[in-house]
Image (cartoon, rainbow, N blue to C red):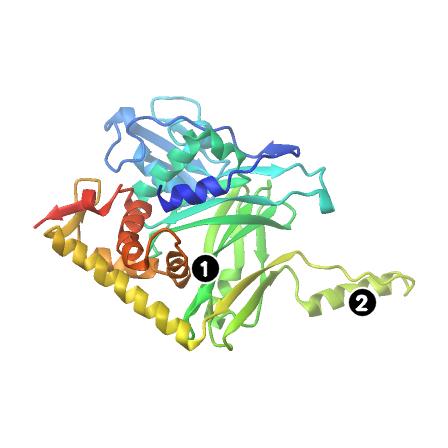
Amino acid sequence: MRCGQRLRDSLIRRWTTAVHTVQVDRMSAGNSVGRTGGGLGGVADLWELSDAGFPPARMTSDQVLATVSQGRVGLASQVRRVSEAQSTRTVSRPEFGYAFPRLNLPSQKLKGKHMPAVVGFVALNPNLARALDVARQLAMDPKARDFGFWYSAHLDWIPAPLVRRARLFQMWNGFWVAPLVESSSVKPGAWLNVYLLAFNLTEKDQQRSLRGGSEIADGMRGNLSFSLPPWTWAIQMVSVPAQGPPGEHTLGFKTRSGAERAATAAAVGILTLGSFVYAPGSSGFSLRYQILPPESARSVEAWEAYALQAAGKRFEDAHASAISDRQGGRIPKETVLERFRPYLTPSLIFAALQNKQNPPEQVFPRLLDEFLFDWLGHGSADQAFLAE
């Protein structure tokens, strides 16, 4: 069983509270969808796509899917075949609907302690075909309907695939944020990378800024601000240098700073002539992470080197200099190993070391299989190798 499937199965929840569906039910996918170059070609496969801030543009079905998977158009976007007179919502088209995020949010009638947690599944991938493949599999899986939300996104700027369970937090009215931590364990002097998936689920533009802890690097603070048109989403990354002492640390994200809360409370106090001072709290969430002690960091680096060495040896044993990209092309061994390295996070290495069924010498060589499955969808490295 692959790691993505193990993670997916661990997220299955039974919803016992009222929910409303932000997006339509699962979409069926055509046989050729999600494969680069797999469109029908010609006028039959030519579409016109439009959205707020996205002028009408003609493109193939593959290009529409890429645009959706990259978050460049939102849930209110419209599409039509060039041969059709009327546009419909892109999310309602079976050719494209599965590529959108799916959200089952608690009813707004549920407040306070009765509001259930919105827990779901997020997969980020630098490979478009694999991102769409995962989205299609989730859309066709009845169990996925039990998720609070799920999304499989194409991000060409990340070095390795990221598959995580996640939780959505409502920070403002109709504005939700899901944090994704690359690794909850960090080597001293390295970086804690946090991906922020933000949704604007309202009919109006929203410009919002989160307040992060002082640990966030100055050059990254701009990524705490979002400007989202109606019914759209975005993914931005912030990084925290691991410069503190070894041990557990907390990184908070809030809607207001302490000074802003105090200023609001003072203003309310003046308006009520001092009879009642209300200090509004702020919505937010905190992430816990661990900075490793030097000896643990050295152990992580040693096992990381061992995993890379074992991956290289598997290429040699197979007399392979590349792998298949599953689209008819080749990916050189050097590129594979270059992307494999950031996949080997300290959290993944600790999880591999905790395997009770097999010794590390058997587990770590197989991490290449897990990586190629998450990245490209290969069943195993042996199936992916291309002989010299």
Mark 2: secondary structure: helix
What residue would you read off at disc 1? Answer: 237
Q: Which mark is residue 32?
A: none
Please name the residue shown 26% across and 64% down the image.
306
Can you tell which quarter of the image residue 90 is in?
top left
The type of residue carrying mark 1 is Met
Q: How crowded is mark 1: few (under 14 residues within 10 Å), some or many (20 or more)?
A: some
Q: How far apart are marks 2 and 1 (CA)?
A: 34 Å
Q: Position of residue 48 (x, y in %)?
A: 37, 32
Q: Which of marks 2 and 1 is nearer the N terminus?
A: 1
Mark 1: secondary structure: strand
Q: On the rendered structure, is 241 left or right of 269?
A: left
Against 345, residue 176 (above or below) is above
Q: Which of 315 and 95 is in front in this view?
A: 315
Against 110, residue 262 (above or below) is below
Could you tell me which quadrant the N terminus lies in?
Answer: top left
Q: How many labels does the image show?
A: 2
Q: Nearer the viewer, mark 2 or mark 1?
A: 1
Residue at the farthest left position: 388
Against 319, residue 128 (above or below) is above
Q: On the rendered structure, is 185 left or right of 298?
A: right
Please name the residue shown 55% across and 44% down the image.
119
Q: Position of residue 308 (x, y in %)?
A: 25, 61
Q: Is residue 277 visible?
A: yes
What residue would you read off at disc 2? Answer: 266
Please name the residue shown 44% across and 60% down the image.
183
Q: Position of residue 108 (x, y in %)?
A: 68, 39
